[in-house]
Amino acid sequence: MVLSVVFGTLISLVTAVILHRVTSSSALRGVILMPFLISNVIAALVWQWMLDPHLGVINIVLDHTIGHSILFLGSGPWAIPSLAAISVWKWMGYYALLIFAGLQTIPSTIYEAGRVDGASELQMFRRLTVPLLRPILVMVVVLTVINAFQVFDIVAVTTKGGPANASNVLQMYIYDKAFRQFDFGYAATLSLALFVLLITVTFTQLRLARADESDLN
């Protein structure tokens, strides 16, 4: 969850700012959104092939550059980061689109005033863009947290909770308890606990980040 939230939000924010400030190509925006339009199962299958230790294109490149391949989905230290990378790639376009929509609400006169005061692009990004995007960024973080807690199909297709339970996320554990061990009562209790946890985390985030307030007001 930490990897998905941190890197997913940062990459989506940078991508949206580049789309807004650097290019106006509709084709490029469509390409960035394409991963979101692919089903999770198809995305997981494609990445499983790309990360294959023998035939995967990523490991072929690594073998030629560093001299050996990496067991991304088959080793404990690499399993969770690999799953987080797949999730970030899958949802990045959707979150970037939300942030891009928020950027459209920021008046251009604010950036013009920043340039008049001698602010660089990096300074305007830190002191103008990010604070003014707080409500949108809070929503993106909340959605990323919920999505990270609900991840199941990517894990089920690629690692199945392995190796040695290294990627046995909560949803996978609930599924195993319900449909393999037939302990439906315990699985239902876990599902309800997850629901309560997500509600608590969501309202806490919204409260602490003051999501209903904007510096544009």
Image (cartoon, rainbow, N blue to C red):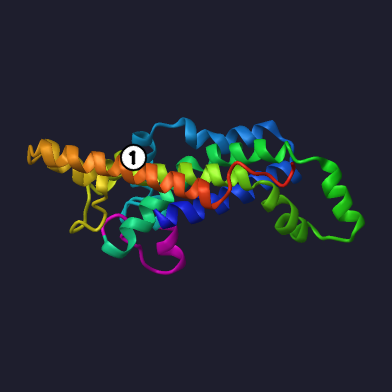
> Is residue 78 shown above or below 37?
below
The C terminus, quarter of image: top right
Q: Measuring from the top left, give residue 171's x and y in whole percent.
A: 26, 43
Q: Measuring from the top left, give residue 79's x and y in whole percent.
A: 31, 57
Q: Measuring from the top left, give residue 176's x and y in whole percent.
A: 15, 42
61 drawn magenta: yes
Residue at the (67%, 52%) spot, across then down: 130
Residue at the (49%, 37%) spot, across then down: 35
User: Along the line of sight, which residue is nearer the eye, 79 or 209?
Assistant: 209
Counting labels gives 1
Residue at the (86%, 43%) spot, across then down: 109
Residue identified by numbered label 1: 45
Name the magenta segment's main secondary structure: loop
Residue 17 relative to residue 113: left or right: left
Dot 1 falls on a residue whose secondary structure is: helix
Instruction: Name the amino acid, label 1.
Output: Leu
Magenta segment boundaries in residue numbering: 60-74
Q: Measuring from the top left, give residue 175's x and y in whole percent.
A: 19, 39
Q: Residue furthest bottom?
A: 66
25 drawn magenta: no
User: Along the line of sight, which residue is nearer the eye, 124 or 26?
Assistant: 124
